[in-house]
Image (cartoon, rainbow, N blue to C red):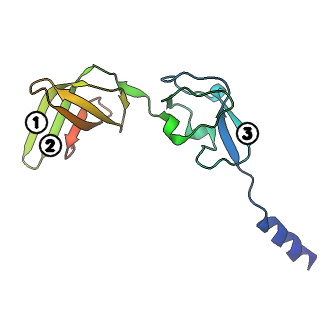
């Protein structure tokens, strides 16, 4: 009977969770390494909990020492820089258009980025690929 009571008490207590924080102040656009991160006891809703979720990613904003790191604060390292000339691809069934464009923002793989078509001067939004191209519309195969 005591064993069941002890088991019930263990199951009723909330699980201890950790919060991932910056070990020091980290500037935006810096890559995060294990030495940049620390874990504090306690669960903060919306904050990351494990270093593996942040190591190798880039700080999108300045991360202050001791403050929790949230998913929106970090992202993949940028491979397209602002004002960089990139290849823009639009594909639809039976049609493929390739043009040069100027990136209007920094972006990493999978990020959405604005780009200006150098031929028409129109601004479009596309997704950055691993090759550093911007796919607009349907998607490159």
Point out the tag, 3 or 1, that comes first from the N-terminus. 3
Question: Which residue in the structure is indicated by mark 1?
Answer: 97
Q: Is residue 15 visible?
A: yes
Q: Residue at x 73, y 47 (%)?
A: 42
- The answer for how far apart the CA atoms under marks 3 and 2 are is 47 Å
Residue 55: percent from the left, percent from the top?
56, 33
At numbered mark 1, what does the secondary structure look like: helix, strand or loop?
strand
Callout 3 secondary element? strand
Q: x and y percent of residue 70 in the render?
A: 56, 40
Residue 5 vs residue 81: left or right?
A: right
What residue is pinned by disc 3? Answer: 40
Task: Determine the CA span between mark 3 and mark 1.
Answer: 50 Å
What residue did someone put label 2 on? 91
**Circle 2 crowding by C-alpha within 10 Å: few under 14, some 14–19, many from 20:** some
Mark 2 and mark 1 lie on one chain; the one further toward the N terminus is 2
- Front residue (pair 90, 83): 83
Q: Residues within 10 Å of mark 3 (few under 14, many from 20)?
A: some
């Amino acid at each position: 009977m005591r064993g069941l009571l002890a088991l019930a008490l263990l199951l009723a207590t909330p699980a201890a969770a950790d919060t991932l924080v910056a070990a020091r102040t980290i500037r935006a656009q810096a890559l995060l390494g294990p030495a940049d991160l620390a874990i504090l006891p306690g669960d903060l809703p919306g904050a990351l909990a494990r270093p593996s979720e942040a190591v190798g990613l880039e700080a999108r904003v300045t991360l202050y020492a001791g403050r929790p790191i949230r998913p929106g604060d970090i992202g993949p390292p940028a491979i397209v820089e602002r004002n960089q000339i990139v290849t823009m691809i639009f594909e639809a069934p039976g049609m493929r258009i390739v043009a040069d464009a100027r990136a209007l923002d920094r972006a990493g793989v999978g990020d959405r980025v604005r780009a200006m078509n150098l031929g028409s001067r129109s601004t479009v939004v596309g997704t950055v690929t691993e090759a550093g191209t911007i796919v607009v519309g349907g998607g490159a195969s």
